Amino acid sequence: MAMSSTVKKRCPFMEKCYRKNPIHFSKMSHPHLEKLLINQLDGTIEIPEVLHFACNDHSQLLDQLKVLRMVLRKEREKNQDNPLPISSLSSEIQSLSTATSDIKENLKEKVERHKNAMIQKRQDKQIDAEAQALSKALINKECESSEGTKAKKRSQESFSAAFVTKKMKRMSIESSNHAKDSQQNISDSQSSFTSNEQNAS
Ligand SMILES: [Zn+2]
């Protein structure tokens, strides 16, 4: 278990402690000594002329400070090497990469949806154009039949009605053939769309 200065127990001898054992300093806290070392972890240790505690032996104090400094430096290194627990860091990276792949997945879905919508639109347009062409042709047929003379029209009415029905049947067959062709066109354009996308990526 790592010992940090905040969880150390205070040395019961307080300012009268004379020990110079590094293990004692790493286990017990000596605030009067640590206070002197706050800004003196590097370089030579200077003992201020006026101390905030009673001290009869400055050389013993200096020895204690040297040992304590060694212990404090080790603790500092430990904290610098490991500012964050590795497990929490790696989980953070993992959650970050998961988020990125989520975004990628969403983008992929969006592209797919857009693509499908485009194809659907194209099909709808083609069908619309076909329907329009068909209705136009029907109107033309009607006009042609009304152009005939009245007498002729009367006598040919039944015949022309039959003719129109016949013609319409044929047209519907043609249009279904046409629909097949256009279906072929759609799948062609679909595959070219896909290959374009592959080229782009
Ligand atoms: Zn002590």
Image (cartoon, helix red, strand yellow):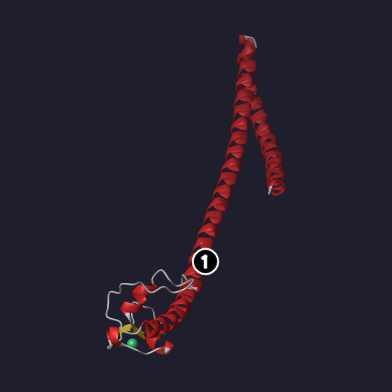
Using the rendered view, name the quadrant where residue 37 is placed: bottom left
Q: Give 141 or 193, whichever is nearer the viewer.
A: 193
Tell me if 199 is positioned left or right of 120 in this view. Answer: right
SS assignment at label 1: helix
Residue identified by numbered label 1: 94
Q: Give 110 or 17, whichever is nearer the viewer.
A: 17
Residue 176 at x, y percent in the picture: 67, 38
Q: Give 154 or 82, whichever is nearer the viewer.
A: 82
Above-or-below relation of 108 to 21: above
Residue 138 at x, y percent in the picture: 61, 24
**In what quadrant of the picture does the N terminus appear?**
bottom left
Residue 43 at x, y percent in the picture: 49, 71
Report the residue at 49% width, 64% height from top: 95
- Mark 1 Cα-neighbour bin, 10 Å: few <14, some 14–19, many ≥20: few
**In the rendered picture of this protein, how many numbered marks are placed on residues?**
1
Report the residue at 55% width, 59% height from top: 101
Using the rendered view, name the quadrant where residue 118 is placed: top right
